[in-house]
Image (cartoon, rainbow, N blue to C red):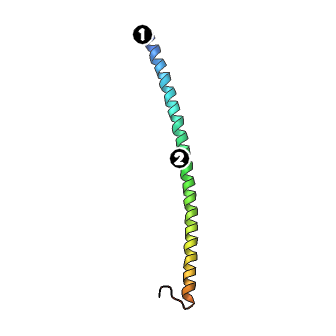
Amino acid sequence: MTAEERLAKVEEHMLVQAGLVARFERRIDAFTEKTEAWIESAETRFARLEVFATAVLERMDRFIAGQEGNGHKIGG
């Protein structure tokens, strides 16, 4: 194999490697975008759950305070 043939093979392999790297980078970018979107969605759901849980606990506290406020003691 001549030097030119070897150089042509090296160039061919470099093109293949460059294509593989580009493909890998596109897949990583897509994965990163999906992951960031999932995290944002999870944060939004968690915030809604936190608001709901706080409202439920506040309502329970008002209910219990109302029961105790009428001269009735719960558990006593």
Disc number for residue 45: none
Q: What element carries label 1?
A: helix
Q: Which amino acid lies under the numbered mark 1 shown in the image of this protein?
A: Ala
Q: Say few, some or many: other residues with alpha carbon within 10 Å of mark 2 (under 14 / 14 to 19 / 20 or more).
A: few
The residue that appears at 56% across and 88% down in the rendered structure is 69
Left or right placement of residue 4 versus residue 61 in this view: left
Q: Residue furthest front?
A: 75
Which residue is more in the foreground, 61 or 25?
Answer: 61
Disc number for residue 35: 2
**Real-space Cα distance between discs 2 and 1?**
47 Å
Residue 10 in percent (x, y) is at 44, 18
Which residue is more in the foreground, 76 or 51?
Answer: 76
The residue that appears at 49% across and 28% down in the rendered structure is 20
Residue 38 in percent (x, y) is at 55, 50
Residue 6 in percent (x, y) is at 43, 13
Q: Say few, some or many: other residues with alpha carbon within 10 Å of mark 1 (under 14 / 14 to 19 / 20 or more).
A: few
- The quadrant holding residue 50 is bottom right
Check the picture and name the quadrant holding the N terminus.
Answer: top left
Q: Which amino acid lies under the numbered mark 2 shown in the image of this protein?
A: Thr
Which residue is more in the foreground, 45 or 7?
Answer: 45
Q: Which residue lies furthest to the top in this view?
A: 2
Q: In this view, does 46 lie above or below 58?
A: above
Q: Which numbered mark, 2 or 1, is in the foreground of this view?
A: 2
The residue that appears at 58% across and 71% down in the rendered structure is 55
Q: In this view, does 42 lie above or below 20?
A: below
Q: Which of marks 2 and 1 is nearer the N terminus?
A: 1
Which residue is labeled 1 in the image?
A: 3
The residue that appears at 47% across and 85% down in the rendered structure is 75
Q: In this view, does 65 lie above or below 27?
A: below
